[in-house]
Image: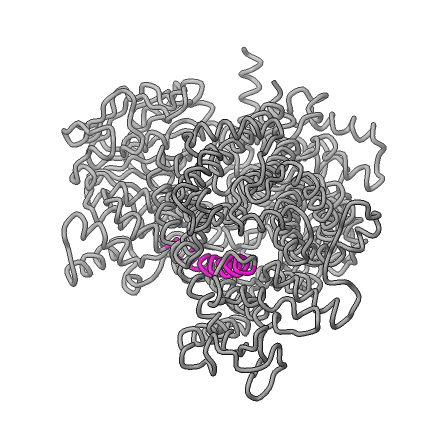
Amino acid sequence: MHPVLKLVVQRLALGLVLLLAVSAVIFLGIEALPGDTAQAILGQAATEVSLANLREKLGLNEPALTRYFVWLWAALHGDLGVALTNGVDIATAIGQRFGNTLFLAGCAAVISVPLAITLGLVAARYNGRWPDKVISGLTLTTISLPEFVAAYFVIFLLTQVFPIFQPVAMVFPGMSFWAKLNAVALPVIVLVMVVLAHMMRMTRAAILNVMQSAYIETAELKGLTPMQVIWRHAFPNAIAPIVSVVILNLAYLVVGVVVVEVVFGYNALGQYLVDHVTKRDLPVVQAVGMIFAAVYIGLNILADVISIGANPRLRHPK
Amino acid sequence: MAEILLEFKDLRIEATSYPPGEPPRHVVLVDGVSVAVEKGKVLGLIGESGAGKSTIGLSAMAFGRGGVRLTGGQILLNGREIRTADAAGLRALRGREVTYVSQSAAASFNPARRIMEQVIETSISHGLMNKSDAEARAVDLFRQLGLPKPESFGTRYPHQVSGGQLQRAMTAMALCPKPDLVIFDEPTTALDVTTQIEVLAAIKLAIVQTGVAALYITHDLAVVAQVADHILVLRGGKKVEYGTTDQIINDPREDYTRALVSVRSIEHAEKSEARALLSVASVTARYRGTDFDVLKNVTVDLAPGQTLAIVGESGSGKSTLARVITGLLPAAQGRITFAGRVLSPDLLGRSKEDLRELQMIYQMADTAMNPRQTVGTIIGRPLEFYFGLKGEAKRQRIQELLDQIEMGKGYIDRYPAELSGGQKQRVCIARALAAKPKLIICDEVTSALDPLVADGILKLLLNLQAEAQVAYLFITHDIATVRAIADRIAVMFKGQVVRYGQKSDVLAPPYDDYTDLLLSSVPEMKLGWLEGVIAGRKMESAGN
Amino acid sequence: MKMPFSAMLGIFLTSSFVFLAVFAQFLAPYSITEASGGVWEGPSATHWLGTDTIGRDIFSRLIYGGQITIFVALASSVLAFSVGSFFGFMAAVRGGWADQIMSRIVDLMMAIPSLIVALVILSVLPLNLTVLILVIGLLDSTRVFRLSRAVAMDIAVMDYVEAAKLRGERQTWVIFREILPNALSPLVAEFGLRFIFAVLFISTLSFLGLGIQPPLADWGGMVKENKDGLVYGKSAALMPAFAIAALAISVNLVADWILSRTTSLKGGRGG
């Protein structure tokens, strides 16, 4: 087998193992912690009898491992169970909201990725000079802000000081694409702000790393123009690190979305998760937690696979 | 007088370094150097580290690495001033009139592109040839430089060929656009000695056949003597001496040049055989998780107060032997006897006395000393650990040791970062001596040092041996060092001892094939040596 | 060596925050629960930063909130550090299966974003200070583990460590005298970054309603309490938000400075 293919297969297999381990941790880890679902639902005032009845009903008397495999098997068939609090089918509830989350994250990605790469290139090109210092200074500030703080600064600025946008982001089925875009403008701005800084800084570092290689000096000593140096010699080597930087930050975006959704009351997966953590609705928390973890792990594997594929040493073995 | 191609007039080069957290530091790298290169001639630039030789070399392309600035004087190339040329003017000359071969071709080739693309790139982007002509020329050069399968060599990626081949490919890359001048910046320094001579011969042949002029930069006078017509000796950014190669080698005028020429001429009379202090008997070893023996059935002896030199190229297993003797890598088979005792193969099984009597000195003194400890702490720790010395007694003994390594007072409270390379290695020697050992293993202890400094260390080691009757196991790739210090020699190749005995026997014919190759590959400081060796080898191969 | 302006500013601000937090009881003009004014009043002589959603003095609550925020962040970063660096050094020096097991556990923990893990855990556990500190500290210790293991591995292969082993030194000497002094400065700078992370983490949790519970409030909680006012142009929520940003940035400035110093220290580990 070609070494690249072999490594990719290995990496995918490792990802599957990791996903399985994560599901076990999320399910069994919760079981191991003190606390009881039945108690959580009924509250401190519940009687012993009602607790016992509920435990029986929820199948909580089975051993944890058995319940894990039952849950896992069902989950693999798209059955995530029903929410404890309102009895709604979790898979259905997630379906809609996941779409909303992807729409929000997608919009943020479409804006932030090209912007981050451009700014990263500019900062690397003018390394140490004023454009670099301005960009780096600004991004250092946004890196120090948690998402919700950034969000409220943006809200205050763009709805009060300059009343351009609405402070809530409601989307519902049947809305036109443009109406949706308009509705998510503010949360997208916040997400772009938060993710841009990391992505741009890492892009800049990746490019600088390549630009400091001896082969770039060789290219300069060949009398090539700066564009030829970048295009022929820096770009083929910088593409892999930049792609993995971008993907890693998209994974980060998936998490940033949770807080931003809550801030803007955006009805999607993150909001749904936080609501049900507060309500202690474990089946929902487990299911949504798994989805976030799976997306995160999936993106990380993708980043690995791309950098394996882009490595000339692996593509052209001795 | 021949036509002048390149001329430096009163060249001045400066740089500003920005150590983190400290004010910027301003340094003058090259100061008032004037020299000229004639068309088709080779000028050797020689000096120790910090002499400014690479900086001058790159200035022939009006290039300054990092924060290096060409601040004064004139650089005339084909009669034009290039120091103050604009970006377009510089691009026009770089890669066309002047090309560059670096020390590390492995780092200088773009890993993502095929060798051929990179070799012909300049010829095409400067509009000198069309693609098929350039490729034909590249293949010719590959052939001329002795690269295997020249027709298909260029289709490979840089990581698919060896270091020596890549160095030759870089030479082809430099020669392809038919430049007027090639800068060779230590092109053979990073190579093994037997590879070095092949590459050196290939470079020399290519220079002769293409008639190109060259700047050849190296710290090794014996190497430059083989290729240069003239030599400029540099020290601390200033010109020391300039002359024909013949004059510099055979009739140096300046003291510094004389010192460089006579380096490695330490005379050391071989001591006679005696009963062994250390005997390594049929030792075989492999690293964990591998199925390959790095040492195969190695047997050597070392007498008290004598020196056994272990010679070999990279991958010969010579450093592994040191690890096995110290117990860092327990031997799989065989036995090591030391001072009449059988040593435990594993470090953990050895007594404190075993450890004390067997000390080690490393190649890189920089990493062999804890940067957070003072010289006093570094030398004092073995005194405290093995002999329980404390307070004034310890301090006094530290000072004695410092005197022994000729460093004197005022160093005891310094940190390693405040010492020069040679001083660092001396402190490491003192740390080993502090344990009053019977044997010191010296692993390439002079390889990272400039020749004159290395000479000083070798002399010191010989003096200390005479005083303290300590034995050395001296690991090196450098035959000159072996001649200077050994009583007994073991030549290693691919994990085996291929030749072993007293120095006078090992270094005298008849040789085995490998030792012959190794010995004949060591550059000698005389003109025409390279031609002699190449002619000798050709006759041999013709004879076979 | 002269300290750069940014570092001085960072140190000044950080120590001011710490000072306010430590002496909160003496410095705050009002108690934490007292409704001493109207709803969302603007800044005035009696209420320097105005009042909040139920008329409490924002300045006083900021000072108390700072106390809680800094306490939780400090406690969890100390926990993260003790646990992370201990096991990180162990893994580096011991190697072998001990290293394998610890590293794989950390890989697993880091395969899920910390916020998600925290949310999942907090859906089961009671929300109190101890739980919050433990959760934040242990989640964060994975990063410290990776860093200290990497730093220690770098140092453990140095010749001077080998020289100490060849001399016959005990493992404790090797760790504490040869490795630790050289690993300290990168770890100290990392401590600053971990502290910021903990501040942001606890603030985010409180903002989501899963951190410090009322009537106590840290800065994140204060943003949550007052966020609705923003729509009416009441800037009360911005004060704690600003405090979080200011603390994070000032600690960042100090950490940056320490990090740049480590490479230039006399006998540092080179540039």
Q: Which residues are magenta?
A: C182-207
Q: Name the image quarter holding residue C102.
A: top left
Residue C7 in percent (x, y) is at: 51, 70
Q: Name the image quarter holding residue B106.
A: top right
Q: Please indicate, yes or no, whether residue A243 appears anywhere in the rendered image.
A: yes
**Vertical relation: A302 (above or below) C77:** above
Residue B94 in percent (x, y) is at: 75, 47
**Vertical relation: C75 (above or below) B442:** below
Residue C193 located within the stretch drawn in magenta? yes
Between residues B317 and A23, which one lies in front from this camera angle? A23
- Give the colouring mode of the picture: one colour
Residue A252 in percent (x, y) is at: 61, 48
Number of numbered markers: 0
For this view, does B428 lie left or right of residue A157? Answer: left
Q: Residue furthest bottom?
A: C45
Between residues C270 and B77, which one lies in front from this camera angle? C270
Residue C33 located within the stretch drawn in magenta? no
Majority secondary structure in the magenta region = helix
**Vertical relation: B482 (above or below) B371:** above
**Residue at the location (52% across, 78% down)?**
C35
Residue A173 in percent (x, y) is at: 78, 45
**Residue at the location (16% across, 63% down)?**
B392
Q: Residue furthest top?
A: B544
**Residue at the location (51% across, 47% down)?**
A280
Between residues B513 and B280, which one lies in front from this camera angle? B280
Q: Please indicate, yes or no, whether residue B449 appears anywhere in the rendered image.
A: no
Q: Name the image quarter holding residue B372.
A: bottom left
